[in-house]
Image (tube, rainbow, N blue to C red):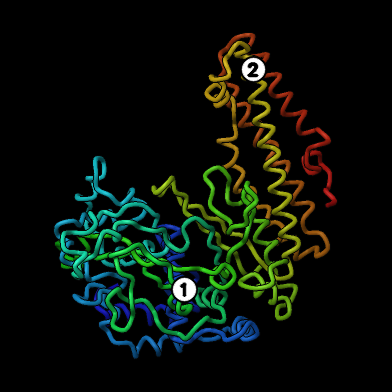
């Protein structure tokens, strides 16, 4: 990708023109893929190339509506609008930071969420000064990801300088207090089709407001931005294009040429951006709402202690029960698609785990979806989650038995460390994920043969796989116990505890080799 406006629009036109030939986007992280989809959706909304009603959306999917109007719109766009390093209106950035870039900017590591730490430059964050230059295309994708997933916290900027309160253009102190991006703290679900074009059509919706404005730069004429002289006041999105291209960060990138004559980014400055006031029903088309421990309802969130695939049943349940948004539209495909088409789409779920303001890890899952298979896939994913949760509880129970028999005099304060030695759940959870994915794929395959019950047999096989796998992990954990009679006895009792749990009447029926009727 080039950096000037004509090169950028040429790349975008090529992408939209070839959208039906491309199966997906090749991205470094799940979050980057979501950010690019958000950007492409914003362009579709800005160009007016989107369905005007749920009924028209249905025809867009079944007729495979061409995205050529987006190409025509991009052709008519002024090149300066898309120039990544324009001196006055750099794409996706805030040119007002230019005077402070040399003094307070850092190396480009700050631009990449996975490398930025908490954005400040103190103590162990001095590595940000020494980051290798980023190729322009990589910097562009990192820029988009920042606007979508940026964590909250303090910015690298030191706040206001003397004279800010007198009306100077230089940002005031509130530019250092950064809010989180629109998708941070929740699971973003994207319906994925058999081509990039189909993916975009699936996720477009009847827009709110006129096509414009698309957020191309902080200093674009005619667009009023927040001031940094006071705390941000969240604003309502002006349109769907505005929603999907909101500038949640003030960013300015400084370019240079590398040894091969390629444009790279070698210095970056990041501060606070805009905040949006989002209405859950209107602005969270893909959200699946779940209950917190306190009884509050909020969009499904990424958790460091709970695997994302355990929540897949919530996605299928949403298709069956939600009356608006993405899932209602997906359900409406039942009227237009044949039963034998199976699962032509997938639901891709992505979230970013943070520890306070520090990014920790991306979570992602991809689950098959077909309009006539929702009930079957919901049953399989729900029972699959129940089975996995129960097996994990039995691994914990077995670990407690082993620990108490090996260390009968251990104090309660010592228990967590000792239990960890015997607890096989750490190995079990990642090992169970592929089996869950295989379970759903098996249901899709069985559906082509048996439309009445494509779930029971795959569930029985899945339960047996998890039981055998979990016991093997338990045995390997118990192998680490000291080689003495007490340990041998503890091992035998722990294994019996696990086996007894698998036979218990409280165990999911599939673990006992029976079909669950629920």
- Specify the quadrant of the image occupied by residue 173: bottom left
- Left or right placement of residue 298 versus residue 259 in this view: right
Residue 236: mark in rendering: 1
Point out the frontmost of discs 2 and 1: 1
Q: Residue furthest top?
A: 485
Dot 2 falls on a residue whose secondary structure is helix
Q: On screen, 497 above or below 451? A: above
The Cα atoms of the two marked residues, 2 and 1, are separated by: 57 Å
- Left or right placement of residue 424 versus residue 243 in this view: right
Dot 1 falls on a residue whose secondary structure is loop
Indicate which disc, 2 or 1, sits on the residue closer to the N terminus: 1
Q: Which x, y percent locates residue 2?
A: 26, 74
- Left or right placement of residue 411 versus residue 271 in this view: right
- Specify the quadrant of the image occupied by residue 79: bottom left
Q: Nearer the viewer, residue 496 or 116?
A: 116
**Within-10-Å neighbours for mark 2: few <14, some 14–19, many 20+:** some
Q: On screen, 478 above or below 240? A: above
Q: Which x, y percent locates residue 318?
A: 67, 64
Total numbered badges shown on the rendered structure: 2
Q: Which x, y percent locates residue 254?
A: 19, 65
Which residue is pictured at 47% across the width and 53% down the height? Answer: 352
Q: Nearer the viewer, residue 260 or 412?
A: 412
- Left or right placement of residue 259 versus residue 47 in this view: left
Q: On screen, 426 above or below 246? A: above
Which residue is pictured at 46% across the width and 65% down the height? Answer: 34
Residue 46: mark in rendering: none
Which quadrant of the figure contains the N terminus? Answer: bottom left
What residue would you read off at disc 2? Answer: 404
Q: Which x, y percent locates residue 247?
A: 36, 69
């Amino acid at each position: 990708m080039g950096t000037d406006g004509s090169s950028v629009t040429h790349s975008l036109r090529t992408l939209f023109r070839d959208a039906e030939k491309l199966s997906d986007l090749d991205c470094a992280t799940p979050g980057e893929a979501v950010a690019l989809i958000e950007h492409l959706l914003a362009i579709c909304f800005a160009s007016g190339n989107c369905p005007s009603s749920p009924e028209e959306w249905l025809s867009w999917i079944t007729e495979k509506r061409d995205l050529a109007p987006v190409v025509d719109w991009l052709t008519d766009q002024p090149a300066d609008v898309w120039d990544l390093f324009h001196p006055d209106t750099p794409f996706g950035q805030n040119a007002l930071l230019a005077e402070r870039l040399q003094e307070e900017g850092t190396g480009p590591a700050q631009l990449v969420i996975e490398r930025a730490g908490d954005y400040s430059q103190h103590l162990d964050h001095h590595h940000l000064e020494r980051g290798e230059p980023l190729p322009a295309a990589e910097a562009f994708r990192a820029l988009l990801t920042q606007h979508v997933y940026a964590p909250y916290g303090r910015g690298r900027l030191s706040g206001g300088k003397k004279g800010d309160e007198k009306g100077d253009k230089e940002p005031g102190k509130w530019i250092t207090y950064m809010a989180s991006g629109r998708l941070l703290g929740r699971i973003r679900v994207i319906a994925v089709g058999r081509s990039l074009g189909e993916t975009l059509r699936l996720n477009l919706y009847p827009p709110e407001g006129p096509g414009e404005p698309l957020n191309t730069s902080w200093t674009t004429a005619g667009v009023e931005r927040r001031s940094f002289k006071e705390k941000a006041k969240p604003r309502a999105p002006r349109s769907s294009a505005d929603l999907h291209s909101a500038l949640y960060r003030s960013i300015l990138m400084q370019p240079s040429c590398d040894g091969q004559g390629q444009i790279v980014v070698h210095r970056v400055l990041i501060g606070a951006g805009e905040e949006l006031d989002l209405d859950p029903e209107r602005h969270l088309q893909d959200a699946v709402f779940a209950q917190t421990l306190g009884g509050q309802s909020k969009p499904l969130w990424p958790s460091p202690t709970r695997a994302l695939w355990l929540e897949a049943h919530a996605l299928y349940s949403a298709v069956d029960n939600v009356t608006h948004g993405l899932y209602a539209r997906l359900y409406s495909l039942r009227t237009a698609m044949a039963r034998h088409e199976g699962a032509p789409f997938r639901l891709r779920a992505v979230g970013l785990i943070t520890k306070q303001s520090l990014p920790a890890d991306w979570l992602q899952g991809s689950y098959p979806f077909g309009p006539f298979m929702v009930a079957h896939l919901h049953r399989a994913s729900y029972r699959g989650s129940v089975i996995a949760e129960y097996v994990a509880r039995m691994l914990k129970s077995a670990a407690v038995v082993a620990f108490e028999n090996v260390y009968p005099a251990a104090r309660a304060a010592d228990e967590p460390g000792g239990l960890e030695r015997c607890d096989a759940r750490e190995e079990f959870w990642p090992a169970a994920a592929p089996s869950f994915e295989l379970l759903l794929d098996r249901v899709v395959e069985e559906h082509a043969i048996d439309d009445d019950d494509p779930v029971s047999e795959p569930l029985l096989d899945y339960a047996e796989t998890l039981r055998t796998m979990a016991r093997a992990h338990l045995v390997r954990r118990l192998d680490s116990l000291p080689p003495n009679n007490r340990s041998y006895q503890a091992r035998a009792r722990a294994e019996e505890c696990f086996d007894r749990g698998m036979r218990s009447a409280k165990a999911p029926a599939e673990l006992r080799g029976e079909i669950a009727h629920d």
